[in-house]
Image (spheres, helix red, strand yellow):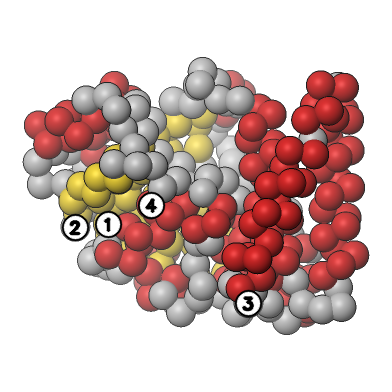
Amino acid sequence: MMKVSIMITTKNRSPDLNKTLGVLKGLDPQPLEVLITADGCSDDTVDMVKRELPDARLVINEQGRGSVASRDRMIREARGDLILAIDDDSYPEQKDALADVSRFFEENPKLAVMGLPQRTDEYPESLTQTDFGAPRRIRSFTSSGAVLRKSIYLTLPGFAHEFFHMYEEPDYTLQCIAAGYEVIFMPQAPSIRHHWTGSGRSEMRNHQRHGRNEFWSTVMRCPMPYLIPVAAYRIYRQFGYACSRGMDWVIHEPQWWWAAIKGLPQVIKGRNPVSWTGYRKWLSLK
């Protein structure tokens, strides 16, 4: 069986993480290791992890570096062949989940990322869902329930630290697809229970981060001469969404435009465009 590491990034959500760690301790087989990044935590997260899971590989960022950079570091430092990415409030529902996960990757050497079915409070209808459809290639995945093959990750640019939070999944999926690898949603794979909550989350802030990072991803990955029209469309589409949410959103929309412009020098420095064929293939996915 391929060796599986589990990675979690967390910030000030000790009760949620404690519950997740309790489930992880019951997995059979156990993961090779559990990597946890406490990213700028000011609660008792660090002490709780040391008490409840003393063998965890704990990274402590005194100053928050963001979930994207935290996950990138954990993937690169993980000792497993595969990395199961979960949130501090999500965990596998099946006790033997890791054995099943390994099997899918052994059967498909080009599988870079496998998205797992989730039952999440964000979408209440999923809590009782039994049919998640057929296996399918996807344009993105969610880090609250996905498995990444480390050997492929190390051959690609990986997660862009500039994003800080959000959009690393579609950007990395694009890298994989353009390089000839597969990113697949596998409904027959072990399922994830995600205790998602809207508290502490700002829809507008997330929209602005998504818009900024989507624009930066376009600058980094889209080849010329297609970069300009694709980037313009991204801005137009995000502005259309803001209009649909009301005038307050429209008034605040230039905030992410300015943030995107300020970060352009660093983003351009890291520009690594893929082929237009690969970019189009990614765009065609859902």
Relative image position of residue 191 (x, y in whole percent):
44, 41
Front of the two marks 2 and 4: 4
Relative image position of residue 66 (x, y in whole percent):
45, 46
User: Which residue occupies 69% across, 36% down?
Assistant: 207
How far apart in space, not on screen, are marks 3 and 4 (Cα)?
21 Å
User: Which residue occupies 78% across, 30% down?
Assistant: 252
Q: Is residue 278 above or below residue 113?
A: below
Type of the residue with mark 2: Leu
- 54 vs 177, nearest the viewer: 54
Q: Is residue 260 above or below residue 22?
A: below
Q: Which residue is mark 4?
A: 70
**Mark 4 surroundings within 10 Å by alpha-carbon count, few (fewer than 14), some (14 through 19), many (20 or more):** many
| Residue 5's disc number | 1
Q: Which residue is mark 3?
A: 272
Type of the residue with mark 3: Asn
Q: Which residue is mark 2?
A: 32
- Sequence-wise, the earlier of marks 3 and 2 is 2
- Sequence-wise, the earlier of marks 3 and 4 is 4
